[in-house]
Amino acid sequence: MLKTLTLLVIAAALAGGVTAWQWPQALPWAGEQAGGGNTVSYVTAEAAKGDVRRMVATSGPVSAVITVQVGSQLSGQVEAVLADHNSEVKAGDVMARIDPKTYESRVAQAKADLQSADAALLVRGANLAKAKAVLAQTEKAVDRNRTLARKKLTPEVNLESAQRDLSVARAEISVADAEIVNAAAVVAQRKAQLGQAEIDLSRTVIRAPIEGTVISRTIDVGQTVAASLQAPELFRIAQDLSKIRIEAQVNEADIGNIAQGNPVTFTVDAYPDRNFTGTVEQVRLAATTLQNVVTYTVIITSVNEDRKLFPGMTANATIETGIAKGVLKVPNEALRFRPRDGGSGGDPAARGRERMKRMIDTAGASISLDDAQKTTLAEAMTKAMAELRPSGGGLTQQADPRRMREQIAQRFEKELAAILKDAQRDAFETWKAERESAKTATIHVLGAGGVPEPRFVRLGLADDKETEIIGGDLKEGETVILRVREGAGS
């Protein structure tokens, strides 16, 4: 009973205090205007619930997920072509051959050079053995002459000659060792040259690097391939045509709404009545500028099990960047309508009370406020409304409605933050961030007697026709004004 009485007191207080929260706009009279007798009629629509989908239209070429260009690292005349357009190949399959005669002769020459190097190594080995034999002989001669010299049986000069021959023999050993090392290096060099020649010979056979379908062939038998700084392309292989991708170009104004995983629908001119589906796989960061228009590449992937999509087709794609289902929405035209004449309809105080109640209920649901907190918040806002009311007892035509809404919103957040519990702080920050990120607008509904009444709303998702209403004064079923009907009186 006490709670009911308290709420009644708050409602009565809001009836007086919330009157200050209004939107003094210039509003036209609908129906017969005072003193004029003229009528103004409007094109209207009903605020109803439904789905809003934000879409981005783009286009791009269809291609295989992986496409490999098969080229030749060698120059020569094409001897055979074993793969054609649309051929299915496996990794390692022979696709073409280049005349190998030149490279076979190089292999034969490299083999002969290697044999010569092996023979030279053997010669150096024999020379080393000879030098060792000479060294052994000179060592014996030195020992013999030393013994005879001690016994004075030979001149001293003979000993000196033998010692000189020993030094020369030792030097010959060093020379022979060096020659063997050099000969071994030449053998290794010749082996490397033979290996290179054999590699070049093997490259005369062009093999498929991956499994897939040949989608391009640029050579014929007898054609001469000239490989210089860049390998000429002979074939192009699409790895798996059961999966395709689209490289779509998206304008910089729309790229911020696109994210990995966004669903995509697209069509191709070959099948105008069929819709294909795909998914955004990647948003590339590199920008492309053409005639001062900045675009970004968005990679879209799709399945192609029936192989209906061919590489090179142009896909006209629509990327779904956001969807809101079962939400209150209005036509975009309602956001642009602005009344031309003075006057306002409806009960501003009632709208203010209803809006305040809706704000408290919305915040309460988001932050899990209890009944006591809601009551405290309502009392605080009643006092705040009285403080914010301009001098003179009410809002005037000169009051700034946008500034007034900002002051009320700031005071509401301040009063709400003052009554929070520690467990509610994180939810409050989330609620606050959502409110700050939402756009606001004023639309007008057709009130009693055909008089336009303003409604302050917060906007959500929008497409090219309608906009989601995520908060504010608008109710489902209300008639929103889109524009003045052409030919209406003024």
Image: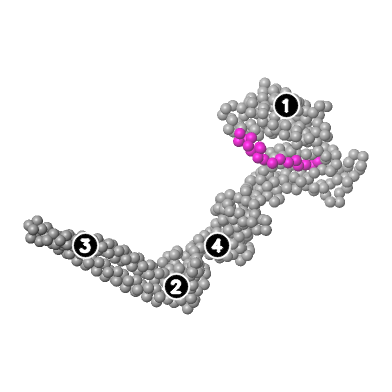
* Gap between marks 1 and 4 measured at Cα: 63 Å
Counting residues from the start of the chain, the first of labels 1 and 4 encountered is 4
Q: Are marks 1 and 2 in contact (CB under 8 Å)?
A: no
**Few, some or many C-alpha atoms within 10 Å of disc 1 (few <14, some 14-19, many ≥20)?**
some
State the mark number for residue 168.
3
Q: Nearer the viewer, mark 1 or mark 4?
A: 4
Where on the picture, by quarter, is residue 293? bottom right
Quadrant containing the N terminus is top right
Q: Residue at x 76, y 26 (%)?
A: 386
51 versus 3 height, above or below:
below
Q: Nearer the viewer, mark 2 or mark 4?
A: 2
Magenta residue check for 12 = no
Q: Residue at x 30, y 64 (%)?
A: 182
* Gap between marks 1 and 2 measured at Cα: 86 Å
Counting residues from the start of the chain, the first of labels 2 and 4 encountered is 4
**Residue toward you, 311 or 454:** 311
State the mark number for residue 63.
4
Counting residues from the start of the chain, the first of labels 1 and 2 encountered is 2
Looking at the rendered structure, the kind of residue marked 4 is Ser
Magenta residues, start to end:
429-452
Looking at the rendered structure, the kind of residue marked 3 is Val
Q: Residue at x 37, y 69 (%)?
A: 198
Where on the picture, by quarter, is residue 415? top right
Q: Please, what secondary structure does the residue beneath circle 3 have?
A: helix
Q: Residue at x 70, y 40 (%)?
A: 458
Provide the residue designation for mark 2: 96
Provide the residue designation for mark 1: 384
Q: Nearer the viewer, mark 1 or mark 2?
A: 2
